[in-house]
Image: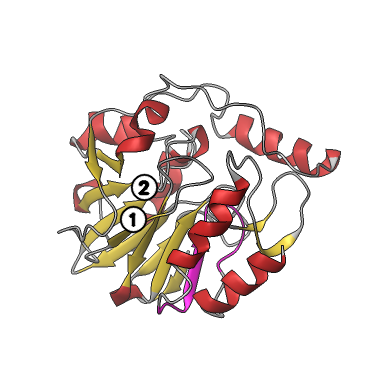
Amino acid sequence: MKIAPGLHRIGPPTSDTVNSYLVVEGGEVTVVDAGLPADRKLLLAELDSLGLTLDAVRALLLTHGDTDHIGFARWLWEERQVPAHLHADDVARARLEVKKPMRGWGPVRPGAVAGFVWYSARHGGLRIPPVGETTTYADGDELDVPGRPRIIHLPGHTPGSVGVHVPGADALFLGDAMTTRNVLTGATGPKPAPFTLDPSQAARSLDRIEAVDATWVLPGHGPAYDAGVGEAVRLIREG
């Protein structure tokens, strides 16, 4: 689904439960987050709609190492030897060597939880493979891949959570540093994400993105937000 020139989310317009994105530049692609295993089919379909194949993918960036963001990472490595770029503090998590503690859930509504579990199960979420090859980035790195994304370390949801700023696409990808649809309650709009390990640290991390100049704020779960980063941060703080 096209969001803006050079900016796409894989899947149909109504499918924003678990998000993966494409930055397209000069016929080459950077993938941001790898969703769930079956989302590889959505990736191939989106590439095909652009007249591209998997050979166009030059990079996979992970905003963090949680299982619903690494789904097709191993497949992409095995198919095209594209490694997963992520922060060093989340590599063990993405390799499934570290299990996420069961805390930071926040409020729960059974219907919303059931919908999320059902969606995840249908997209391979019950059997997530670990990532394949990895390479790490650090805060402030600007990557030589399509879009020339800049990395902003945003610890809190996980130790290695990051934002990915792509000025040319007027976009900031935030993974689970925020949500626009809480998968546990169904609440919409920019808000703190559930399953956050250190909510206080996550709140402090917002200071690092408040001044980022980007119209599109793109979460790991929920629809794209187009009123700018500063307004999204204000609403998240109101939480």
Name the element at disc 2: helix
Question: Residue 170 in the image: x percent, y percent?
Answer: 38, 77
Quarter of the figure with residue 104: top right
Span highlighted in magenta in the image: 213-224
Question: Residue 177 in the image: x percent, y percent?
Answer: 53, 54
At 44% from the left and 68% from the top, the residue drawn is: 209
Task: Read off the residue under disc 1.
Answer: 48
Q: Is residue 128 left or right of residue 223?
A: left
Please state which amino acid type lies under the numbered disc 2: Leu
Q: Residues within 10 Å of mark 2 (few under 14, many from 20)?
A: some
Quarter of the figure with residue 71: top left
Tell me: residue 226, above or below residue 58.
below
Viewer-closest of 148 and 196: 196
At 41% from the left and 23% from the top, the residue drawn is: 129
At 81% from the left and 41% from the top, the residue drawn is: 108
- Residue 216 on the magenta segment: yes
Quarter of the figure with residue 87: top left
Whether residue 156 is visible, yes or no, is yes
Is the Cβ of the residue at disc 2 closer than 8 Å to that at disc 1?
yes
Q: Residues within 10 Å of mark 1 (few under 14, many from 20)?
A: few
